[in-house]
Amino acid sequence: MNIHEYQAKQVLKGFGAPVAEGVAITDAGEAEKAARMLPGPLYVVKSQIHAGGRGKGKFKELGPDAKGGVRLAKSIEDVVANAKEMLGHTLVTKQTGESGKQVNRLYIEDGADIARELYLSILVDRAVGKVAFVASTEGGMDIETVAAETPEKIVNLPIDPTAGVTEADASKLSDALKLDGEARADGMTLFPTLYKAFMDKDMSLLEINPLIVMTNGRLRVLDAKVSFDSNALFRHDDIKALRDETEEDAKEIEASKYDLAYIALDGDIGCMVNGAGLAMATMDIIKLYGKEPANFLDVGGGASKEKVTSAFKIITADPNVKGILVNIFGGIMRCDVIAEGVVAAVKEVGLKVPLVVRLEGTNVDQGKQILDQSGLDITSADDLDDAAQKIVKAVG
């Protein structure tokens, strides 16, 4: 689960991290009051959407010469003018795709005098099986660009889970970020604080880009991106309360109600598969034959007829879907249950696009019989390769 920048900063502030004062607003009429609550005279007006690259993004309605989604304001009047221009408009960034995201919230924040911009994140390093810090002196840039062009400027530091962030770890991070004086002292306190927040709140990503050294020599968290492990949200009612469903894909929200693992993609072939590995293989083979998957959808190992029906409805609700591939290997999941769910869904919502079904495993013969006797226009496939070729050909 993702949250907004202003929410992430409030979470981090609760652990003692240094963040600027700020006020979130949803109406341009609140902008002046929000700005007067801050020290000034420098302010930053920030679009609050679940996507990176806001500063370099462009508003669809404002033309190519308009300023981006993060703007510096040197007066309260400037804050108000920017708020009026940004709220309700669609911001397009490298992460939103061409459709962009409508800006429904702004964060008015106290400005900062910046001496240096740094990069710092905490994530799960699966290569070593530990939570790790990623640090770089090249803050403000895309970390992917830094990794590609100057990888020597990135330091990866795994943390021993039994010890946490030790003084030696904090010192290594300070060295990596070339901190000295008050900034180094702040870092020695900040790094274990951020690690505690990451662990206590079951985060899957904590990214601060940039972490700044101000002209007064102190550190400040200038931006914050936080994602949480959805499987651990039952432990954190306070975090669940931060969820903003307006920032999420409606199909993904619907899928979560039925405990379906669903992620919307940009292709035109809808996929319904059981098992994450098989789902990935199904998407790969669709791409191999020249098409793109419209989604990742894992119905799980013990799906009911109702769950399968719901999954099918979610796929067909996507207007981009031009064909559907159902690929089931029945172990725990029975092929006849899948077949009954598919038939029920097709009869309920109709079938306007080609449908190819590949079944194998438990009760496969019963499943195929159910499909054959349904009277529906369903194409059967013998194996995954055959299924992929048939759906790609059907879609054209």
Image (spheres, rainbow, N blue to C red):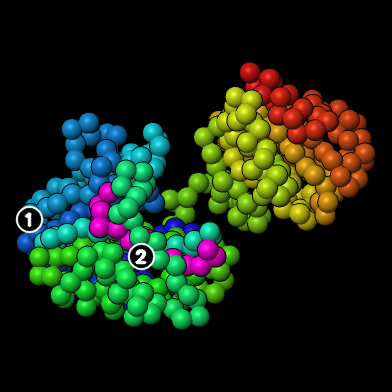
Q: What amino acid type is highlighted by mark number 1? A: Ser
Residue situated in front as seen by the camera: 83 or 169 = 169
Residue indicated by mark 1? 75
Reading the chain from its start, which is encountered first: label 1 or label 2?
Answer: 2
The reply to whether residue 14 is in sight is no
Where residue 251 sits in the image (x, y, percent)? Answer: 56, 45
Label 1, label 2: how far apart the Cα atoms are: 26 Å
Residue indicated by mark 2? 8
- Can you say which quadrant of the picture contains the C terminus? top right
In the rendered structure, are the residues bearing label 1 and label 2 in contact, judged by CB atoms less than 8 Å apart? no
In the displayed structure, does residue 44 sit left or right of residue 57?
A: left
Residue in the picture at 63% in, 51% down: 261
| Magenta highlight range | 128-143
Instruction: Give the number of marks.
Output: 2
User: With respect to residue 101, does 130 lie above or below?
Assistant: below
Residue situated in front as seen by the camera: 75 or 133 = 133
The reply to whether residue 363 is in sight is yes
Magenta stretch encompasses residue 163? no
Residue situated in front as seen by the camera: 328 or 217 = 217
Residue in the picture at 7% in, 54% down: 74
Secondary structure at numbered mark 2:
helix
